[in-house]
């Protein structure tokens, strides 16, 4: 469950985003479903198993190009009382995004030793292999009559002094910038009589008796439009070294430097259907008069909230691997990748705008561009593979991969200091509790139909790393639920039973196919297609409040990749 971002990337969702791999490499490895741990011999296979560079007794250069198309089909569900435990999704909003890609480029040099036994050859390679593509676009729209983003922002602002929000240096405070922008941009107001905030889409009802509280309610209908866009990629810079021992055992070591470029944006707009239902009197802090001032009565007509986030991420890890041929035809492979140490440099900012029937009261606000840097430890992984070659007619290959996401951890950069507490304590706690081990099964096949033409196919099945629990009250607790009541779980007011841990049923299914041509000389060319059915995603534009579950968007995602590889052996 992805809640709209309100600050920087330090969430479980973003830890998984940067930590997960979806290897591309060359068209041959892609067509075979990347089931190449025990195969080797291809530039793309080196990212899976570094021993693959020493398998072929020749040098080679390869270059790959292609495109990725992401499609989403989204439905909108309005807010509901959590007691009903039901959300009704309606509508079908289609979106797509296409980007050109360069999944692979590199060279692998093989040197013979001239020995008849022992180390017969060794290789050195340098390449860039793509390990993830971030391409998605989602949008949906629907009618909402119980909650508003302005109300959620008002609840998030409670406890902040209104006169600070009205000052010129308000962004120098420790308060959330989205709440500051919401106040400065007219989305929320301060009720000086009650000492609380309320949304511009809410009607204020004074208490009927001294024992009652003020009531803030959305009494009309809003048209809400929601959208997100993600762009970027993760490419591994690979330096590989391998040895060939007796043409039976191949060993390899790689130093990998993943480079991530990631851009994410959110867009939320709401517009009233009948302005007469949203008559309000705004109240703001007048810096000149140093007092709260009420504006002229008017009607709230709508608002827009935008969030933009950019991350530049670089890291390093080591990978060791082996391929063994115990008998003719049978191949066994294994590889282990250490945890990746990343440095994340991020920037983000918020834009808001409010609209009223009295245009003179329209307002907007933009935060400064925030910058931060910190470290992130991504999970380790282990690959095991078995393949059987059918002479020169083809092969069958099966891989199993294990990745432990529970070790993901954020930390301060070396040299940075924090005075009072670890700022990453909460998210690291969530990572450890709600992320576990993901399992992947990859199956690939290659058959030579002509002396120079091969057909290939592959299948991937990947389980989710996310898990949930049952708490002391018998309710299912997901990461967003635990995070919303984090202090209650920490002080023991609420608790979870760790023995009830269950993994999400979300699965990733991928089908691939391709064709390859190998000339009698040095040239070869491969073409591959891959279609991925991604798990459904659920997105909430703002947090739950007033004991009501906020609107949500459910999206079904597919990803189509096409890759063409050209290579030369020498």
Image: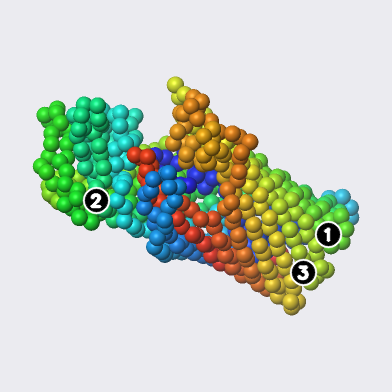
- The single residue placed furthest to the bottom in the displayed view is 450
Q: Quadrant of residue 447?
A: bottom right
**Is any part of residue 24 visible from this angle?**
yes
In depth, the one of 354 and 339 nearer the eye is 354
Q: Which element carries disc 2, helix, strand or loop? A: loop
Determine whether label 1 and label 3 are within 8 Å by CB.
no
Q: Residues within 10 Å of mark 1 (few under 14, many from 20)?
A: some
Q: Quadrant of residue 38?
A: bottom right
Q: Which residue is mark 1?
A: 330
**Sequence-earlier tag: 3 or 2:** 2
**Sequence-earlier tag: 2 or 1:** 2
**Sequence-earlier tag: 1 or 3:** 1
Residue drawn at 14 percent across, 27 percent down: 290
Residue drawn at 81 percent across, 57 percent down: 331
**Is any part of residue 365 visible from this angle?**
no
Q: Which residue is mark 2?
A: 220
Q: Is residue 184 above or below residue 38?
A: above
The percent position of residue 562, horizontal first and vertical second, equals: 56, 67
The percent position of residue 26, horizontal first and vertical second, equals: 63, 62
165 on left or right of 555: left
Q: Between marks 3 and 2, how big is the CA–CA gap?
A: 66 Å
Q: Which element carries disc 3, helix, strand or loop? A: strand
Q: Which element carries disc 1, helix, strand or loop? A: strand
Q: Between marks 2 and 1, how big is the CA–CA gap?
A: 69 Å
Q: Residues within 10 Å of mark 3 (few under 14, many from 20)?
A: some
Q: Which residue is mark 3?
A: 394
Q: Residues within 10 Å of mark 2 (few under 14, many from 20)?
A: some
């Amino acid at each position: 469950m992805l809640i709209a971002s309100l600050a920087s990337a330090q969430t479980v969702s973003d830890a998984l985003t940067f930590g997960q791999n979806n290897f591309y490499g060359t068209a041959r490895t892609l067509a075979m479903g990347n089931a190449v741990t025990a195969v080797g011999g291809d530039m793309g296979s080196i990212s899976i198993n570094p021993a693959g560079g020493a398998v072929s007794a020749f040098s080679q250069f390869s270059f790959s190009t292609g495109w990725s198309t992401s499609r989403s089909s989204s439905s909108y569900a309005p807010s509901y009382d959590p007691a009903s435990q039901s959300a009704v999704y309606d509508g079908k909003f289609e979106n797509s995004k296409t980007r050109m890609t360069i999944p692979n480029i590199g060279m692998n040099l093989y040197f013979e030793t001239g020995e008849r036994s022992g180390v017969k050859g060794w290789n050195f390679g340098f390449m860039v292999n793509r390990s993830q593509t971030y391409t998605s676009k989602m949008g949906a729209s629907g009618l909402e009559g119980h909650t508003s983003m302005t109300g959620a922002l008002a609840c998030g602002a409670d406890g902040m002094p209104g006169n600070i929000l009205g000052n010129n240096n308000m962004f120098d405070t420790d308060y959330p910038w989205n709440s500051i922008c919401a106040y400065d941009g007219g989305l929320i107001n301060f009720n000086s009589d009650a000492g609380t905030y309320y949304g511009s889409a809410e009607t204020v009802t004074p208490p009927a008796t001294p024992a009652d509280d003020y009531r803030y309610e959305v009494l009309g209908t809003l048209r809400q439009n929601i959208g997100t866009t993600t762009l970027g990629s993760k490419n591994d810079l690979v330096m590989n070294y391998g040895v060939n021992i007796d043409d039976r055992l191949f060993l390899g070591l790689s130093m990998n430097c993943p480079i991530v470029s990631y851009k994410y944006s959110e867009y939320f707009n709401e517009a009233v259907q009948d302005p007469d239902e949203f008559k309000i009197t705004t109240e703001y802090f007048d810096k000149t008069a140093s007092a709260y001032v009420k504006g002229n009565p008017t009607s709230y007509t709508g608002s827009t909230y935008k969030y933009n986030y950019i991350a530049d991420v670089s890291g390093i890890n080591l990978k060791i691997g082996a391929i063994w041929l115990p008998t003719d035809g049978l191949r066994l492979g294994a590889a282990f990748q250490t945890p990746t140490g990343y440095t994340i440099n991020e920037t983000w900012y918020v834009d808001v705008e409010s609209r009223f029937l009295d245009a003179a009261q329209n307002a907007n606000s933009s935060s400064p561009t925030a910058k931060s840097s910190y470290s992130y430890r991504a999970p380790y992984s282990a690959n095991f593979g078995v393949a059987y070659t059918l002479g020169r007619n083809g092969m069958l290959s099966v891989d199993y991969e294990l990745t432990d996401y529970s070790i993901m951890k954020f930390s301060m950069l070396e040299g940075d200091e924090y005075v009072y507490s670890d700022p990453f304590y909460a998210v690291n706690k969530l990572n450890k509790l709600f992320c576990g081990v993901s399992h992947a099964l990859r199956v690939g096949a290659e058959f030579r139909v002509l002396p120079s033409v091969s057909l290939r196919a592959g299948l991937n099945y990947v389980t989710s790393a996310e898990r949930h629990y049952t708490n002391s009250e018998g309710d299912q607790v997901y990461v967003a639920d635990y995070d919303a009541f984090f202090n209650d779980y920490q002080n023991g007011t609420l608790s979870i039973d760790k023995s009830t841990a269950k993994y999400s049923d979300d699965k990733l299914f991928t089908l691939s196919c391709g064709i390859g041509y190998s000339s009698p000389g040095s040239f070869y060319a491969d073409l591959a297609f891959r279609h991925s059915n991604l798990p459904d995603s659920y997105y909430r534009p703002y947090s739950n409040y007033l004991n009501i579950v906020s609107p949500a968007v459910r999206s079904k995602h597919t990803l189509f990749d096409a890759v063409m590889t050209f290579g030369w052996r020498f």
